[in-house]
Image (tube, rainbow, N blue to C red):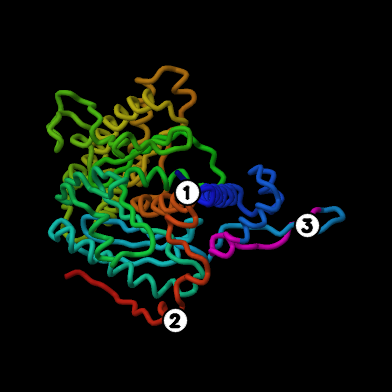
Amino acid sequence: MPSARHDQATLRRGNLGLVLRTVYDLGPVSRSDLVRRTGLNRTTMISLVAELIDRGLLEEVGNRHPGTAGRPSVLLDIHSRGAVALSAAVGLDRLEVLASNLRGRPVAHRELRLDVPRDSPETVASRLADLVGDLEGELAGYSGSIAGLVAIVAGMVDAASGMVYLSPALGWQDVPLRELLNEALDGPDYPVLVDRRGRLCVEAERRAEPGATTRDLVVLFGDLGVGGGALVNGRTVLGAHGLGGEFAHVVVDPNGPECDCGARGCLGALVGLPPLAEAAGLRLGDGSGLAVVVEQLRTRAADGDDQVVAELRRQATWLGTAAATLVNVFDPEAVVLAGWFGILAEWMLPTVRSVLDQRLVLPQRRALDVGASTLGLQAPIHGGVGTVLEHVFADPVGSTGVAPRSKLISSRSLLGATSRNHSSS
């Protein structure tokens, strides 16, 4: 049976997370504002804020004058140079690690060109650990520790266990990626998480505009194939096994081509970058990278290449068909095309909207906003900070690796770290 002391500690951790989340949502805010917003008493609030400042999660950012007689209020905000979140993206042709502060502002970045499918998962984990080590040298000016690392993979991922069930693009099946990363990082004192690209696209979109109020959203993300996710009542849909949002396997044509999963007519079997590149006479995997190929496709479409534009419209028809199904299931405020769908939205959105107009009833059509993301192919890596942040909110003390100042990253050890440049082998 839990002791009273254990119950008190659990309650305090919950209150620390509540205060931190409230500051994140409201921006610069005074202690008095926090008392009113959270319902906690002033004495408790003073103690909680002091601990969050000590842990490098909050900072005082100035005063707000009342406009009348009285003392000005000291404002609090998320520490701009405090704890950092690491997002590590595993792509086909490269590994990337991005360090961001907890507001999502990038502070450091490392990239390694690599033919990922040809290397073993163990090698990939080791190379990612090297990139993380390189980043530490750039974090010497930050007063906080690493709050967490999220590794991002395209495919079917169980975020709870850190297992990559299936990633056709990488040729991975039943890869215990979190376990491999923990070993490669020599048991770090921060949590290592694994998530899929599509879900983190949703995180990126929900945080793209400060103060945005969208709570119900469907995102369709294009890279090599199709990913995405749904936000319902402010929460990302995970499902019982963490696989919610696998939109690539929504059947849009029962008589269509066979999918990797064995079914016929899945969205992922009808929509993707390879057939679009083929229509343009471009070849993926020639070392130029996905971003370069997408930019070449955008140029071809802008120049009026009939084959490219026709293939974009064909794929947009299937996207619109799938989107109509998803709108009927989730009833979102908005549908967003992201990844290369967003980059090439000028030639896809009209068809997607036309299909939705044909397939949705009038109240749905009137209320639905259909648009394009501006985050491009980098959306998932920027969305990773949201996953780390949720863990910080859940437990700012124990489960996040964020320690009091006495245990923060040693500036001496960081200044001694060597930053290395990597190139293709």
In this view, the residue in front, 327 or 130, is 130
Residue 149 lies, with reference to residue 130, above or below; the image says above
Q: Nearer the viewer, mark 1 or mark 2?
A: 1
N-term-proximal mark, 1 vs 3: 3
Amino acid at the residue labelled 2: Arg
Q: Which residue shows up at 31% across the image and 55% down it?
A: 151
Relative image position of residue 285 (x, y in whole percent) = 16, 56
Nearer to me, 192 or 170 = 192
Q: Residue furthest right?
A: 69
Name the residue located 28 percent from the left edge and 70 percent from the top edge. Answer: 130
The reply, left or right, for residue 188 in relation to residue 11 is left
Q: Which mark is residue 394?
A: 1
The secondary element bearing badge 1 is classed as helix
The image quarter in which residue 124 lies: bottom left
Q: Secondary structure at mark 2?
A: helix
**Residue denoted by label 2:** 412
Q: Earlier in the sequence, mark 2 or mark 3?
A: 3
Place of residue 90 in the rendered image (x, y in percent of width and height, measured from the top left): 26, 56
Task: Measure the C-alpha gap from mark 1 to mark 3.
Answer: 33 Å
The residue range painted magenta reads 51-66
Residue type pointed to by label 3: His
Mark 1 is surrounded, within 10 Å at the Cα level, by few (under 14), some (14 to 19) or many (20 or more) other residues, namely many
Where residue 65 is drawn, which disc sits there? 3
